[in-house]
Image: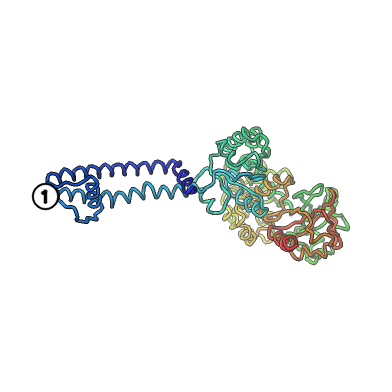
Amino acid sequence: MKFIGSQLAFYMSDTDFKRNYKVLLKYLALLGIVIVIYSILFHFIMGFEGQNHSWVTGFYWTLTVMSTLGFGDITFASDLGRLFSIVVLLSGIFMLMIVLPFAFIRHFYIPLLESKEKNKVPRQVPAKTKNHIIICSYDIIARELTERLKQENTPYYVIENDLEKALKNYDNNVSVLFGELDEAQTFINANIKDAKLILVNRNDIVNTKIILTIREIAPTIPIVAIATDIESVDVQQLNGANHVLPIKKWLGEQLANRVNTQHAESHAIGQYEDLLIAELPIHNTPLVSKIIGDIGLRQKFGVSIVGIWERGRLQPIKGDEILTHDSVLVIIGNKEQLNNIDIIFHDYHINPNPVLLIGAGKVGLAAAEALYKDGVSVNVVDKDPEVCKKASPFCNQVFIGDAADYQLLKKAGILEAPSVLLSTHDDTINIYLASYCRQLNKDIRIVSRISETRNVDIMQKAGADFVLSYATLGSEAVLSISKGQELTVLGEGFTLFIIPIPKSLEGKTLAESGIGAKTGLSVIAIKENSEVVTLLAANSILPHGAEIVMLGNIDMKHKFNKIYVNDA
């Protein structure tokens, strides 16, 4: 009874429900008045016929006639009385059997269900919630981020101010809170003072308002904001954001960095401690056709090979792989070691033809600018003359038109270009262009952006050598900040895992552990007492109390946990 009472009190406080049940109460009051009037008239007409009945009998007769029960124990003898009975009967059919059920359903039952539905979305987090991440919009970055947070058992809450979207997210098992993003109470209800960080990922203008609202109640909470336009970065920082991420600009730069791998030199893609993680393409170098275990990069330069890219897929190292022109090695070493490799291989394979960039929006423009700074010549293809005008300062030539036009692509240099970068904002178009460009030039390196991570596989099947999504880059950036780590973008779905060595592996050698063979993860370093060891061998010991650094994807990590942690 206490629960029912609290639920009714909750529903009665809902504005829409309150308005509807008031309408129902007014109708019930009208119905009561009609019953009273009919009961009074019953007594007058019965008196006219010489019959005398109590007031209870009058109400009893009125209700039995209006409800069409008609027991027949009390009847009128005159035509006036019978005419009155007909009026009472017809009005009863209309008011009790038609209007009342409709009014009850329309103004009570349906509003009750609607109120119950919309109020099932929480308005505040559970008591004592701590170290959670608050997200201000369930966009494509948030979708990717929340999946990673679930996998890592990190609590999160998405604040949604649109009830329909909040209900949809709630039904899809997203931890969502309903509230207005410009109201301080919403963030108080989210227990913001005990949160780990908050991701502000609306548009640039709304972000500024949210940041100011948050800073009034939580001056020290770390705020990570997503900036659509590079011009808004300073504005959001000045208003209180600790980290402002221009993801589209970064995406363009990351893609440009992968375009450059067609040159025979290493390109840093991440950092762990004082070590750099880099990619080394071997196209047209002496390493082509050699077995990876025989090339001796560790002995010659001190670097370790931790993975190998083959047409868009990152493979763990087994030692017996035969390298091809499409192979791109993932290596780890310090700056001096990487520079020594560049000196040896830099003279191999330099294609003087311009890189082809298709799509020069925000991402494409950032890529063009990054390539221009690196001294790489670029030809741009885009339908929009205004977009081409913005890109022209960073390009060799600009071609206005549809990239599906063979003659246009031929003029732009598709047949001679070392690489093509696909940066349109439509995944379907990028998939089509990847397939088209691969058919036109079998040897060209295809680098592409996508928006949705679910399109990675089909993009790779279409012929792309490297794919990176806006969602992945954004989620990885936020996760890196939450963990206090450097952002390392290895590729779509791949990341670094830094975890304590499980007890089941303590004291074993790498060969005895079988990590690579059983999980596919590549062990790239062991950290013990602040000392990082990357020159690992099969007999390297996994010591007690140390951390192990591994490269791989989420599925590989799940296998690791299942084999070495959960079964320990």
Query: Residue tagged by mark 1?
Result: 79
Residue at 51 percent of width and 44 percent of height: 162
Mark 1 burial class by Cα count in 10 Å: few <14, some 14-19, many 20+ = few
Is 28 on the left or on the right of 466, as rendered? left
Position in image of residue 164 (x %, y %):
49, 47
The amino acid marked with disc number 1 is Asp
Position in image of residue 557 (x %, y %):
71, 59
Helix, strand or loop under label 1: helix
User: In the orientation shown, which residue stands out farthest toward the bottom?
Assistant: 320
Position in image of residue 509 (x %, y %):
84, 62
Report whether residue 404 is seen: no
Q: What colour-coding does the image apply? A: rainbow
30, 519: nearer the viewer: 30
491, 510: nearer the viewer: 510
Residue at 54 percent of width and 46 percent of height: 122
Is 177 on the left or on the right of 397, as rendered? left
Report whether residue 1 is seen: yes
User: In the orientation shown, which residue stands out farthest toward the right?
Assistant: 299
Position in image of residue 439 (x %, y %):
63, 61
Looking at the rendered image, the quarter that the C terminus falls into is bottom right
561, 279: nearer the viewer: 561
- Count of numbered labels shown in the rendering: 1
